[in-house]
Amino acid sequence: MQDQYGIDQYVISIPDFPEPGIIFRDITSILQDPEGLKKSVDGIIENLKGVDFDIVLGPESRGFIFGMPVAYAYNKGFVPVRKKGKLPRETVEKEYELEYGTAVIEMHKDAIKPGDRVVIIDDLIATGGTIEAIIEMVESLGGEVVKIEFVMELAGLNGRARLSDYDIDSLLIYDGK
């Protein structure tokens, strides 16, 4: 395990959930603890020092939680990525693979403009499928993903390898799944 900002102490690990042999890392305990939340947001802000970007993007729902205060701290706009059917204006969408089926995410078509330099922030990288779909949407609109920030990474699921063409940071990395 790598824990750059002392965040592991705020994560509750639940063995054998959702099935035997799996350790579920509950990130909601970070959100409930004022110091854990502060360390997480401050860690992401620190990791973005020196990065030239125009906008912060975060997927529903925890990407909203961690992305919004970062956008605020850097005086940047925030783009929400939502499940299909939740946004009121014209959207772009992307279907992606889940463990058991597929899902569709979308964002407003006018949210990213050609040449925008985008930072993506989310709570967790596992297989990388959600973020890969988001990258494809950003790039289809002419944006450039310049950095991807995660609070937690499950390295055993190889999501980082799937996104190897991008600059990725994770505050907390667990070796397993």
Image (tube, rainbow, N blue to C red):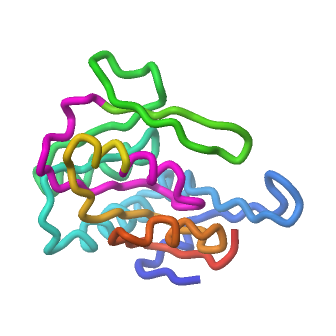
Quadrant for the C terminus, please. bottom right
Quadrant for the N terminus, please. bottom right
Of all residues, the one furthest to the right in this rendering is: 20
* Lateral position of residue 132 relative to residue 13, left or right: left
Q: Look at the image and give the residue range highlighted in magenta.
A: 108-135
Of all residues, the one furthest to the top in this rendering is: 88
Q: Quadrant of residue 170?
A: bottom left
- Please name whichever residue, 153 or 93, is drawn nearer the observer in this view of the structure: 93
- For image coordinates 59% across by 73% down, the residue present is 155
- Please name whichever residue, 132 or 73, is drawn nearer the observer in this view of the structure: 132
Residue 36 location (% of width, % of height) = 45, 64
Residue 19 location (% of width, % of height) = 85, 55
Residue 83 location (% of width, % of height) = 48, 30
Image vertical order of residue 32 relative to residue 48, above or below: above
Residue 132 within the segment the image draws in magenta = yes
- For image coordinates 73% across by 41% down, the residue present is 100
Residue 97 location (% of width, % of height) = 61, 44
